[in-house]
Each structure stands twice: as structure tokens, then as C-alpha cells.
Image (cartoon, helix red, strand yellow):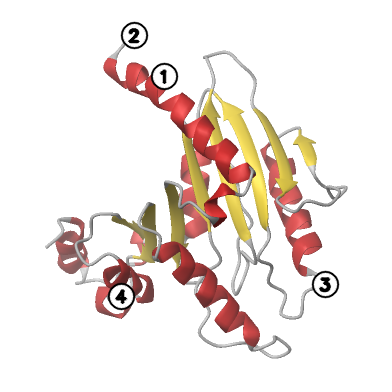
């Protein structure tokens, strides 16, 4: 067994323990280690998640992610089949859309359907309950990610203004947890100095010890701005 495989095997029991504790709501009283994906709306969070998991997450403009999604990935031995299960975190009966899914496209559809179930009856179209996706495949890492709704600054016509406060409160609650690694997703064609999630992360994590930035949309970099982006990638 090589070193990487050995580390993966050693880490798996701890990841399973954390996922089990989270499933029982322990994080309400005891902050658990986790990686939270944060960023502006349409920053490319869905593309990052798809790159890691192979799942085509719902995407589009505006508030596509309207509740948190916990993605639990487990690497299985080569030759084993891809499998996934989707559910919601509430204590009541699971919706009809919950349960095992047959392929990646069906999982994307299930996430959309469960999002509608959680958010359709709320005042602002946003829910504090979460979707839980359990994914097993030889092609995924042993990793659990938490995808949060994109930062909301203004509301659109027909959208309740409380969504701005609710989404911001959710994001800030994770930023403030010292055991949360912030995966800050930001488009490469935007001025780094204006990116909201980096400013928020800097306040919560001044030393940058638990903040990891991911640049997306490199194909949209303006001509002449390449050097600036390279400086960012070099942490300068």
C-alpha cells in the first residue's frame, strides 16, 4: 500500500465518525471539523463541486443553492459500482424524491427536487434545513464538503428581503467556527480586492490558517490581467 492509500485508509474512520456525529446534530453543541464551500452567487461553486465529485450540481444565475448541501464522498475499491443516496436533514418523513439514485443525472435531479421540497413553503424561498448526499465511487476522494448558498446582497422582484439576512447569518455562522475550513470560491475575472467572501474570511480567520481560495472561470480573464491572476495564485 502506497503512502497516499495508507493515509486515506487511516483517515476514513475519523471521517465516518464526524459524519455520524453530524447526523445526530452534535454540531449544535460541539463544533465539528468540516470544509464549507462559500462564495458569491454564480462564482462557480457548482463547477468546483462537480470537479471533485463528478456530479453535475444544479447551476444557473441567481440563488440556485437555496439550502445547504452536505456531500459525503467515500472512495471504494477499483471495479465497484457508483452509488448515491439523497435525503434531507429534518426529523420528519423523507420526501418522495429522497432515496437511492441510479446515476449522476438522476442525482442532480433529486437535489433540485429536494431543494424545492425544502424551500417551496418558506417565506423567502430559503431553508435552514439541508440536503445530505452520500456518494460512493472508486473515482471520488474520502471527503465531506458542505455547500452553502451564495452570498446575497440584493433581492429580485418578488423575493422576500429576509433572504439576505438569513443567507448571511448562515454563512457567518460557519465562518465563525474555528474547526471549519473555508473553501472560498471566486471568479478569476473579478478584482480580488472586491471579493466579499475573502473579506469575510479575513475577519474570521486573520492568519489565513483555515482559508483556501479557489479561482474559477480562468477563460474569462481580461486580456492584460493575466499577470495579476498569476500573482494571486502565487499568494503574493
Q: Residues within 10 Å of mark 1 (few under 14, many from 20)?
A: some
Q: Which percent across, then down, holds residue 210?
A: 29, 54
Question: How far separated are the C-alphas under marks 2 and 4?
Answer: 42 Å
The residue tagged 4 is 199
Asked whether, in this view, residue 133 is left or right of residue 236, the answer is: right
Mark number displayed over residue 121? 3
Question: How far separated are the C-alphas under marks 4 and 3?
Answer: 33 Å
Q: Earlier in the sequence, mark 4 or mark 1?
A: 1
Q: Are marks 1 and 3 in contact (CB under 8 Å)?
A: no
Q: Are marks 4 and 3 in contact (CB under 8 Å)?
A: no
Question: How far separated are the C-alphas under marks 1 and 2?
Answer: 10 Å
Q: Earlier in the sequence, mark 2 or mark 4?
A: 2
Q: Residue at x 22, y 67 (%)?
A: 206
Mark number displayed over residue 1? 2
Question: How far separated are the C-alphas under marks 4 and 1?
Answer: 36 Å
Q: Earlier in the sequence, mark 1 or mark 2?
A: 2
Question: How far separated are the C-alphas under marks 1 and 3?
Answer: 42 Å
For label 1, the SS is helix
Q: Earlier in the sequence, mark 1 or mark 3?
A: 1
The residue tagged 1 is 9
Which quadrant: the C terminus?
bottom left
For label 3, the SS is loop
Observer-nearest residue: 193 or 21?
Answer: 21
Q: Earlier in the sequence, mark 3 or mark 2?
A: 2
Observer-nearest residue: 75 or 64?
Answer: 75
Q: Residue at x 35, y 57 (%)?
A: 178
Q: Which percent across, then down, holds residue 38?
A: 45, 62
Question: How far separated are the C-alphas under marks 3 and 2?
Answer: 51 Å
Which quadrant: the N terminus?
top left
Q: Residue at x 52, y 75 (%)?
A: 169
Asked whether, in this view, residue 58 is left or right of residue 15, the answer is: right
Amino acid at each position: 500500500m502506497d503512502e497516499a492509500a495508507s493515509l486515506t485508509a487511516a483517515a476514513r474512520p475519523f471521517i465516518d465518525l464526524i459524519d455520524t456525529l453530524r447526523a445526530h446534530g452534535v454540531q449544535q453543541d460541539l463544533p465539528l471539523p468540516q470544509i464549507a464551500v462559500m462564495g458569491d452567487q454564480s462564482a462557480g461553486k457548482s463547477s468546483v463541486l462537480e470537479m471533485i465529485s463528478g456530479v453535475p450540481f444544479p447551476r444557473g444565475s441567481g440563488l440556485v443553492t437555496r439550502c445547504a448541501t452536505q456531500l459525503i464522498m467515500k472512495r471504494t475499491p477499483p471495479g465497484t459500482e457508483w452509488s448515491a443516496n439523497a435525503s434531507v436533514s429534518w426529523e420528519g418523513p423523507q420526501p418522495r424524491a429522497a432515496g437511492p439514485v441510479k446515476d449522476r443525472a438522476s442525482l442532480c435531479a433529486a437535489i433540485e427536487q429536494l431543494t424545492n421540497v425544502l424551500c417551496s413553503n418558506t417565506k423567502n424561498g430559503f431553508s435552514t434545513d439541508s440536503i445530505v448526499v452520500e456518494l460512493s465511487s472508486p473515482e471520488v476522494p474520502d471527503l465531506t464538503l458542505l455547500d452553502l448558498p451564495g452570498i446575497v446582497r440584493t433581492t429580485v422582484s418578488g423575493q422576500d428581503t429576509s433572504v439576505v439576512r438569513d443567507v448571511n447569518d448562515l454563512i457567518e455562522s460557519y465562518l465563525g467556527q474555528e474547526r471549519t475550513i473555508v473553501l472560498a470560491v471566486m471568479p478569476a475575472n473579478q478584482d480580488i480586492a472586491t471579493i466579499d467572501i475573502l473579506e469575510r474570511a479575513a475577519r474570521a480567520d486573520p492568519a489565513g490558517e483555515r482559508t483556501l481560495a479557489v479561482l474559477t472561470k480562468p477563460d474569462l480573464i481580461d486580456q492584460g490581467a493575466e499577470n495579476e491572476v498569476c500573482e494571486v495564485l502565487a499568494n503574493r
